[in-house]
Each structure stands twice: as structure tokens, then as C-alpha cells.
Amino acid sequence: MIEQDITRIRVVSAEEVLRHGTPALALTAARQAADVRRHPASKTKRLNLALPGGWMRVLGASLPPLGIFGYKEFHYSPGGMLRYVLHLFSTDDGRPIGILDASMITTLRTSASATAAATAYFGDAVHPLTVGVIGSGAEARAGLRALVAALPVKAAHVTSRREVNRTDFAEQMSAELGIPVLPAPDAASAASGADVVYLGTGSSSVVVAPEDLAGVPLVLSIGSTMPDQRELPGEVLAGAAVVVVDTWDVLKESGDAIAAAGVGLDRSRVRLLGDFIEAPGSPSAGTTLYKSIGSPEQDLVLAAAIVDDMAGLDGRFVDSLTDVKRNL
């Protein structure tokens, strides 16, 4: 017998994700996600499938300590379109909680998790910071926004392959954030004198040289999320004093980390983000490098926080698509 499930499910648009996914909410969710990942009851799984001319990825997680489970699915089609969706459920009874446009979820949780690493690194006693940004797309913009919202950033320098893009980025982000954001002709110039460098590119090839980042205390790298992508030279990861990862899958899925393994990356210097946030220790004499490929608990915890923030508000709802199966 099939019994109809009368649950009403909230559907959250990209615009609503942006409206409710404030930097403060996203940062809190990122810290909570990093912590819950360490719980023995939490489980995550990643599935990568090749399609003709494209690919599909499914990131799933069960987080009983928070009462939620679900998955994010996104795919690239031959037509050149990326599409994302997230389904969220309750571990108590399997009840659907929400269906969310996951494109902006991805962008927000990526920048928030990197910022969680940065705030742990700098701690409470922070002098005004200069940020170097490499990349001028949506991920780079979100990264700078998140850092400025959480830390005393006094200035930023941005570079990207096309001059017009870095100039537009500098003008628009200066006006939005109220700090000087200046275009730089190359990565070395953007990183010169920076307290933290944020790399947010979708590059398939290395965009910096090891000497470009020499002397930078903290490097946040959120590109190169698949084996065929590259952002950093392997020597940068292998030479870092501390490498912080949002998931151990970084070591086998990021092209940067795979390259680093080939040039002597010491696994004993690699730490999980939740462990680093709990006990960052004193800043190392060398570079601390945060490397992210994204992890499903980050998506689900932020999605749940947004749905909670929308409680009691009007919006779009649909009838449950998951009827309840009973024994015959």
C-alpha cells in the first residue's frame, strides 16, 4: 500500500539563498559543518559520473547530530550549462525539508569555509589586513566579500587573465565594500605584501608560480576541485608548513594535491578544517595553505540554516514527491 505524504516542502530560489545566506549566517554554518564532519555518526559520500561531453556529481551526507541528511546534485552538459539542486531531509522521519537552488549555496559555502580557516588562523588579535585575490569571477568576489565581512581588511589587490575583468572587479568591489581594491597586472603583484591570498579560479592550468606566493602567511585556494583542474603548483602545497583541507578527498580529487603528492607532500602536515578551527595553534613560520574542493556537509548545513531562517515566511511550497511506502 502506498500512503500519500502530505508534507509541504519549501522551494528556495537562488535569489532567496542570497537574501538569507548572509556572510554571518554562512560563516556560522561553515564552522558548524566543519565540526559536525568530525562526529563519528556523520557520513559523507561523493559520486562522479562522466557524461557524453560533460559530467555529473552527487555529494551526499548524513548528519544525525544535526538531524538532517540529503544530497546536492550538479552537472555540466554539452551545451555549456552548469545546473545545481539540493534536497534536504530530516533524519527523524525522512520528511523532506527543502529543495534549494544550489548554485549560490555552493558559492556561499565555499567562501565561508575558507573564511572559517582564515578567522581561525588570525584569531582575535588581528591587525588590518591586505588581501590578494587571484581570479575575478563569482567565486573570487564571494571570497573577498566573506573575508571583509569577518576580518579587518584594509585593502585588496586583484589580478586575472583579462585586464578588463580585473579592472571591473576592482571598481565594483571598491564601491561595494568601501575599501580600496586595486587591479594588479600579475599574480606576483597581487600577492606582494598580502597577509592572505585568495585563489578562486576555474583554471585547468597553474595560475601562479611558487615564488609568487613566497612569504605569504596564509593562502586560501578553492579552485582545482577535480583531477584535471589545476590552480597551484604542486610545490606550493608540498612546501607549505601546514595544509588545511575541508575533506580528505582533496588529496585524491584535486589536481593540485595530486601534483603535490608527486613532489613530496608530507601527509603529517595535512589537517582537517574542523581540527584546525578547534586548535589552530600559533601561526607557523611558513605558509599555512587551505585547500578546498567542497564537501557535502557544508552544503547541507548552510541549506538547513537558510530554511530555518525562512521559517514562518511566505514563499513557494510544493507537495511532497516522496510518498510513504507501507508493507502490503
Image: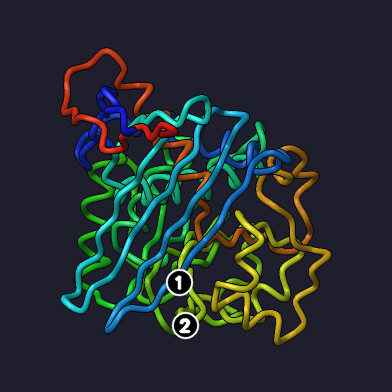
Residue 154: in sight, yes or no?
no
Residue 98: in sight, yes or no?
yes
Q: Quadrant of the C terminus?
A: top left
- Farthest-out residue, front: 328
x 37%, y 63%: residue: 158
Which residue, given by chain and number where applicable, does mark 1 sit on? 189
Query: On the picture, is 130 further left or further right than 78?
Result: right
Q: Position of residue 242 (x, y in %)?
A: 74, 61
To which quarter of the image does residue 322 belong? top left
> Of 70 and 123, which appears nearest the observer?
70
- Distance Cα–Cα, label 2 vs label 1: 27 Å
For label 1, the SS is helix
x 59%, y 46%: residue: 118
Q: Amino acid at mark 1?
A: Ser
Q: Position of residue 123 (x, y in %)?
A: 67, 36
Query: On the picture, is 186 further left or further right than 216?
Result: left
Q: Residues within 10 Å of mark 1 (few under 14, many from 20)?
A: some
x 28%, y 48%: residue: 174
Query: On the picture, is 313 further left or further right than 204?
Result: left
> Quick check: 46 above or below 304?
below
- Disc on res. 147: none
Which residue, given by chain and number where applicable, does mark 2 sit on? 228
x 31%, y 34%: residue: 323
Q: Earlier in the sequence, mark 2 or mark 1?
A: 1
Q: Amino acid at mark 2?
A: Asp
To which quarter of the image does residue 65 belong? top right
To which quarter of the image does residue 168 belong? bottom left
Q: Position of residue 143 (x, y in %)?
A: 41, 51
